[in-house]
Image (tube, coloured by chain):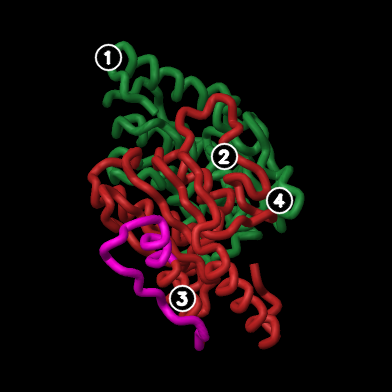
Chain colours: A green, B red
Amino acid sequence: MECPFQKLFPSQLRRDDIFFMSHAYNEAIDAYKENEIPVGAVMVHGNRVIASAHNRVAALKDPTAHAEILVITQAAQKIGDWRLNETKLYVTKEPCPMCSGAAIMSRIGEVIYGFCDPKMGCLGGAISLLVLPEINHRPVIKTDILRDECYALMRHFFETRRSNGNVNDH
Amino acid sequence: MECPFQKLFPSQLRRDDIFFMSHAYNEAIDAYKENEIPVGAVMVHGNRVIASAHNRVAALKDPTAHAEILVITQAAQKIGDWRLNETKLYVTKEPCPMCSGAAIMSRIGEVIYGFCDPKMGCLGGAISLLVLPEINHRPVIKTDILRDECYALMRHFFETRRSNGNVNDH
């Protein structure tokens, strides 16, 4: 599917949240072009991107193939441990129930997301899983990084699909 | 690791909840023997087991390799669709935040679990993700199938690990 949005190419010299979220955004553009709901994610460790993926539910016919699950698996392989305490997850949209849970279970240090999802977001948008009283890990949460860009991509994707008569959206 | 519990071999003639949970329980025994937290799961479609797995987080060094995530991916491959409305998930323990979310996102028709997890269970034990007001799918939940057997396996596993001085449990 044609995507009217352009990828971002921030300077390598300034490795801040916007730099890393730009990579996640670029992954979301790849998802858009593949007619997947445009969510992208990267994992960062020691100020380097160690994993990068976008939503592939439709292509893989796998409901667990969200961008976050794919990067968490990749990152754990890179680090050689399922515990990801020293990592940061950047994702364009607030994680769904499954991926919010995955961020907790994999002990990610920090989750940074683009825009909030008041319908399904489980790190503050709809509910927060961090209220679980006996949880043994709580990632730091940061929001609204490249929010407008990440949200515009998602909104345009669904508007285009609806105008094309696709009613089977999830 | 040696496991003092025996696998169950229920009659093939009576394909009820106990029959299918016995398969999940047998998977949990395999997990125990591999020194993985003993959780097993199967997916059922049209009264047949179409997917079967146990927890493999340690072996795969993958925090997403819970029994439920593995069977959901397998089942979607078998069915050829990420939407699993016609399936049932049998799992020995109440799903964690990630796997409770996965059951919702994959639109599983029914989730049947062995014992409740008041610490991390997100289908009624600690909290219920089904209270999300705008969720577009709610599996039917059934609990306490082979509860005592499934729980005894888990309790014995942790007691043995603790008596062996393993303090790195999750």
Q: Image point 47% across, 45% down: which residue?
A: B102
Residues B39 and B81: in front is B39
B8 relative position to A135: left or right: left
Relative horizontal placement of residue B74, taking residue B159 as reference (left or right)? left
Which secondary structure lies at badge 1? loop
Q: Which residue ends up furthest to the top in the rendered image?
A: A163
Q: Which mark is on residue B90?
A: none
Which numbered disc covers residue B29? 3
- Magenta-highlighted residues: B2-24
x and y percent of residue B89 in the render? 41, 51
Using the image, name the chain to which the residue with label 4 belongs. Answer: A
Crowding around mark 4 (Cα neighbors within 10 Å: few <14, some 14 to 19, many 20+) is some
Which numbered tag is attached to residue A19? 2
Residue A100 spot, x, y in % from top left = 58, 44
**SS at circle 2:** helix
Query: Please, what is the three-letter code of the amino acid marked with disc 1?
Result: Gly
Frontmost residue, B160 versus A48? B160
**Alpha carbons under labels 1 and 2: distance apart:** 36 Å
Judge depth for marks 1 and 3 and give the one in front. 3
Q: Which of marks 2 and 3 is in front?
A: 3
Which residue corresponds to the image point at 31% horizontal and 24% vertical from the top-left?
A168
Residue A4 x/y as whole percent: 35, 20
Q: In which quarter of the image is the N terminus of chain A?
A: top left
Determine which of the numbered discs, if any, sits on residue A165 in the image. Answer: 1
* Contact? badges 1 and 4 (CB < 8 Å): no
Q: Which mark, residue A138?
A: 4
Is A53 left or right of A80, judged from the image as shown? left
- Identified at 42% across, 44% down, the residue is B110
- Count neighbours of disc 3 (C-alpha within 10 A) and say few if under 14, some if 14 to 19, many if 20 or more: many
Label 4: element kind: loop
What is the CA distance from the residue labelled 2 to the residue labelled 3? 46 Å
